[in-house]
């Protein structure tokens, strides 16, 4: 299978620790996948859905205490504490290895250890990185076969001495008190033990493609980001690409799979989905930023996915999909809250208990059938808007970078930064309200720079500096924007229709990149003039765009204060340029405030 001595020695070392009964190499063949599936069906680890209605689809239930990423059990283990910064948990590497070894020790007795060689990015591309995950979970293997390129071709690419990330995963007892997700960037190693939940155990994803990759990207001058990538084809047939970062619960997957509204489809617009979660970006010889999606699958949230919010996701998951923690229905069907139509009359909930839609908990709240973080794992190629460019080794050129958040009042529908440096500050200031806030009673705001708070594998002060430096390396850097689909009126209703209509905002963004759309200057950046968004076919109240792009200097000055406090947590690792940008923003806001008080400019 492999002549790679270091790989063989590492597998042996892990096997000596975990003591599996057998070691099985994953070759990437259909034959082996089918065999493993059959085995997992036999043991009940996965359950086939009705194969007539859901061909190739299976259902899996995790342990009840193991349904989401556990940030408090996730550590970056480096020699110097300062290198992980204030936003990560830190542990000295020796302590990490010692504590986790105690849990791994003998944990695979009576189990098999699977060896999954995988490539993030097309095998052999200049972007790509190879990892090898060892795991005792068939569920992990079956998910990895969807999420990344796996198997013999990766081992062939690795040759006898190629570099690879060592990823060790073991379920152990699935005990939350004996669960650790450890990253050792100095050793190019990840250890995850005690969990079976995707984000903790599909080690290619958040652990390698973001936490370790962001560390490597800083050293090697590229960017590993928590971003979707999509292409917008305009009526002239020109396709331009956007990379966008949003914190959780802001509709990232929905935007990646956007279906143009009828008016824009008629005009000739089309969307090409490249990725919904992670972007790796490099400066090419043309001085532009080029991006790939290192993954080949979606690990998407089921709840709220329906024919309005994301029709392409529904089409994507009709076959060859693994559903985790959804409601299981008689006859091999499934359901989740927010799916179209009526709730089923009964089913088995994500915990494995009988469920009916009228069930209430002891506080009188409805009992959900599916877990709010229930997931689908499905191949990218099944998305109706899947881009033909995902196998291209050089990726796609990025024209615009878009940051976003969920803000009931503060942030306009869209604004553009004045420069790369200003744009980086906009990304660093990013924040989102955890829930839809009512007017006058703002939801809790969580700062989430570039949507990387849980995923940046090093000191975020250094991360901002790296972003600034990337700007100096590009002859034609993407323009940077910020969007907010969630602005509300005084009664708490959303002002902007969202979903497919967001393409109208993307259209303005790309026109701005070509210098073709008018804009108005505000203290926070450029916003659309009232007639620069194409609203054909939309029935919106008059002056809505003005309302959506209003900048309130008082509210923004309070925001500046809150960002200042957040920036202070990085101490002297925060680049001066970030402080300068914040000071300039404050100056511009105060000027506007004075002008408003003097009756100038509204
Ligand atoms: C995800 C996340 O699962 O960002 O993609 O939490
Ligand atoms: Mn994500």
Image (cartoon, rainbow, N blue to C red):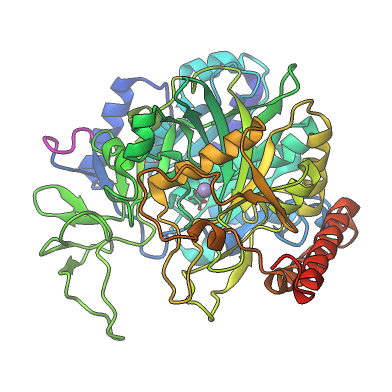
If the image is split into quadrants, where does the C terminus sit? bottom right
Q: How would you classify the magenta stretch by its main secondary structure?
A: loop
| Residue toward you, 589 or 302 | 589
Quarter of the rendering containing residue 189: top right
| Residue toward you, 589 or 153 | 589
Q: Residue at x 49, y 15 (%)?
A: 153
Res. 12 visible in picture: no
Left or right, residue 357 beside residue 452: left
Q: Residue at x 55, y 25 (%)?
A: 121
Q: Residue at x 10, y 64 (%)?
A: 345
Q: In the figure, 566 relative to 294: above or below?
A: below
Res. 150 visible in picture: yes
Quarter of the rendering containing residue 112: top left
Q: Residue furthest bottom?
A: 363
Q: Residue at x 81, y 53 (%)?
A: 461
User: Where does residue 18 sit, x and y in percent of width and height?
Assistant: 52, 44
Left or right, residue 74 beside residue 55: right
User: Where does residue 567 sit, x and y in percent of width and height?
Assistant: 79, 63
The number of numbered badges drawn on the structure is: 0
Question: Residue 52 in magenta?
Answer: yes
| Residue toward you, 204 or 576 | 576
Quarter of the rendering containing residue 549: bottom right
Question: Residue 380 in magenta?
Answer: no
User: Where does residue 563 sit, x and y in percent of width and height?
Assistant: 75, 66
In magenta, the rendered stretch is 51-56
């Amino acid at each position: 299978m492999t002549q790679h001595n270091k790989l063989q020695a590492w597998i042996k070392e892990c096997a000596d620790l975990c003591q599996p009964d057998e070691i099985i190499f994953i070759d990437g063949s259909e034959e082996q996948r089918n065999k493993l599936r059959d085995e997992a069906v036999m043991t009940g680890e996965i359950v086939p859905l009705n194969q007539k209605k859901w061909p190739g689809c299976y259902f899996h239930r995790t342990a009840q205490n193991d349904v989401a990423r556990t940030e408090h059990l996730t550590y970056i283990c480096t020699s110097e504490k300062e290198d992980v910064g204030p936003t990560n948990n830190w542990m000295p590497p020796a302590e990490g290895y010692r504590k986790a070894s105690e849990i791994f020790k003998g944990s695979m007795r009576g189990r098999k250890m699977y060896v999954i060689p995988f490539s993030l990015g097309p095998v052999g591309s200049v972007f790509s990185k190879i990892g090898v995950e060892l795991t005792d979970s068939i569920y992990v293997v079956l998910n990895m076969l969807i999420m990344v390129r796996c198997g013999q071709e990766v081992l062939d690419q690795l040759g006898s001495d190629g570099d690879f990330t060592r990823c060790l995963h073991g379920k152990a007892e699935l005990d939350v008190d004996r669960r650790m997700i450890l990253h050792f960037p100095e050793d190019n190693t990840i250890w995850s033990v005690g969990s079976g939940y995707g984000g903790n155990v599909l080690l290619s994803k958040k652990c390698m493609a973001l936490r370790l990759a962001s560390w490597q990207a800083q050293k090697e001058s590229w960017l590993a980001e928590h971003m979707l990538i999509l292409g917008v084809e305009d009526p002239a047939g020109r396709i331009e690409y956007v990379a966008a970062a949003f914190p959780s619960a802001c509709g990232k997957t929905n935007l990646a799979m956007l279906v143009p509204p009828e008016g824009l489809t008629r005009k000739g617009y089309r969307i090409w989905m490249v990725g919904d979660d992670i972007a790796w970006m490099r400066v090419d010889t043309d001085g532009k930023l080029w991006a790939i999606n290192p993954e080949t699958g979606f690990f998407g949230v089921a709840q709220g996915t329906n024919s309005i919010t994301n029709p392409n996701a529904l089409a994507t998951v009709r076959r060859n999909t693994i559903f985790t923690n959804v409601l299981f229905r008689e006859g091999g069907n499934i359901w989740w809250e927010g799916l179209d139509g009526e709730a089923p009359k009964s089913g088995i909930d994500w915990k494995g208990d009988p469920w009916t839609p009228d069930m209430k908990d002891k506080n009188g709240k409805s009992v959900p059938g599916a877990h709010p973080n229930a997931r689908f794992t499905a191949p990218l190629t099944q998305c109706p808007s899947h881009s033909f460019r995902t196998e291209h080794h050089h990726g796609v050129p990025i024209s615009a970078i878009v940051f976003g958040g969920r803000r009931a009042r503060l942030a306009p529908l869209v604004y553009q930064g004045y420069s790369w440096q200003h744009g980086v500050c906009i990304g660093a200031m990013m924040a989102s309200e955890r829930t839809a806030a009512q007017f006058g009673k703002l939801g809790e705001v969580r700062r989430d720079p570039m949507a990387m708070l849980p995923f940046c594998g090093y000191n975020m002060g250094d991360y901002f500096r790296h972003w600034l430096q990337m700007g100096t390396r590009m002859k034609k850097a993407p323009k940077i924007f910020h969007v907010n689909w969630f602005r509300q009126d005084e009664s708490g209703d959303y002002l902007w229709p969202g979903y497919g209509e967001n393409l109208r905002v993307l259209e303005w963004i790309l026109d701005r990149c070509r210098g073709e759309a008018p804009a108005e200057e505000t203290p926070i950046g450029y916003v659309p003039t009232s007639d620069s968004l194409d609203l054909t076919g939309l029935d919106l109240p008059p002056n809505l765009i003005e309302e959506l792009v209003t900048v309130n200097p008082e509210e923004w000055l309070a925001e500046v204060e809150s960002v200042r406090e957040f920036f202070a947590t990085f101490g002297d690792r925060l680049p001066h340029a970030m402080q300068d940008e914040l000071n300039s923003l404050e100056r511009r806001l105060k000027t506007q405030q004075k002008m408003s008080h003097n009756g100038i400019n509204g």
